[in-house]
Amino acid sequence: MPTLRLIIADDHPLLRAAVLHALSAALPKAEFVEASSVATLDAALARHMDVDLVLLDLSMPGAHGFSALLHVRGERPEVPVIVITSNEHPRVVRRSQQFGAAGFIPKSAPPDTLCTAVSTVLDGGVWFPPLTAARSDADDKLARRLAQLTPQQFRVLLCMADGLLNKQIADRLGLAGNTVKVHITAILKKLECYSRTQAAVLVKALEPDRES
C-alpha cells in the first residue's frame, strides 16, 4: 500500500507528467492519480477515499474558475488542495486562499518549490506566495453561501450555469427529473436567489479573471 496518494488534476498531459516526475523523486513511496477534467477528478475522489492531497489546475474542462476548488472542498473537506495555475495575478492567489486552498504554486515555479510546497501542506501547513491583494468581503460572503450547498446541489448549480435544462441536468448527473427540481428549489432558497439566472451569476463570479 502506498504511504501517500496524490491526485494531479490538470488537462495538459505534459504538465501532469512534469509534476509527477518532480514529486516522484521527492515522494518515492507515493501513488499518483491523474485527472484531466472535473468529471475525472470527481471519479478519482469517489474511487480513492484515502487521498492525501489534490494538486488542482483552475482551468480544466467542466470548471468555472474556482468552482472545482470549492467542489473538492465541499466533497472532501479533509483533503487539502494546492492550486497550480499559470495565472499568478495577486487576486487569484488571494481568492484561492479565501475559497479554501491550502497552497498556491505558479506553473512557472521550479521543481524544488513544488516539492517544498507539497511537503509543507502534507505536514499540515500552508504555502502561498506573498499575499499582496486584500481580502474580499464579497468573496468571503460568496464562499459562505456556496458552502451551504451539498456536493450534489453544487453539481446541479454548475449545470444550471452551463444553461442546461432540467432534463439535460438529469441526463448528465444520472438523476430523476423530480430530483433535479427538488435540488434547484433548495439551491435557490439557500443562495437567496429568485431565478436560475441569478444563481448562474454567482457561478460567473468564480471566474479567476474577474479581478485581473
Image: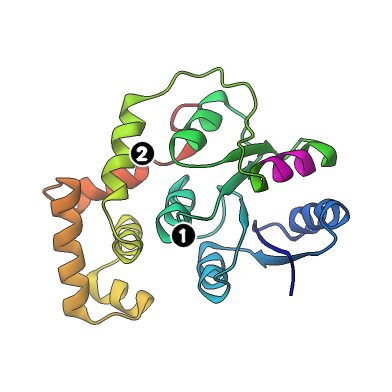
Point out the stretch of residues depicted in magenta.
114-120
- Identify which residue, 102 or 203, lies in the foreground: 102
| Mark 1 crowdedness (10 Å alpha carbons): few <14, some 14-19, many ≥20 | some
Amino acid beneath label 1: Arg
Q: Tell me the residue at 25%/76% (across/down).
A: 167
Vertical order, 162 against 110 (above or below) = below
Looking at the image, residue 111 sits to the left or right of residue 141; the answer is: right
Given this view, does label 1 or label 2 mark the residue nearer the observer? Answer: 1
- Identify which residue, 201 or 137, lies in the foreground: 137
Label located before the other in sequence (1 or 2): 1
Q: Tell me the number on the disc at residue 136.
A: none
Looking at the image, residue 203 sits to the left or right of residue 130; the answer is: left
Dominant secondary-structure state across the stretch colored magenta: helix
Farthest residue, direction right: 25
The residue tagged 2 is 205
Residue 140, horizontal then vertical, whole percent: 34, 32
Q: Secondary structure at mark 2?
A: loop
The residue tagged 1 is 76
Is disc 1 in contact with disc 2, using a CB cutoff of under 8 Å? no
Q: Which quarter of the figure has residue 128?
A: top right
Q: Is residue 188 magenta?
A: no
Amino acid beneath label 2: Ala
Q: Is residue 118 magenta?
A: yes
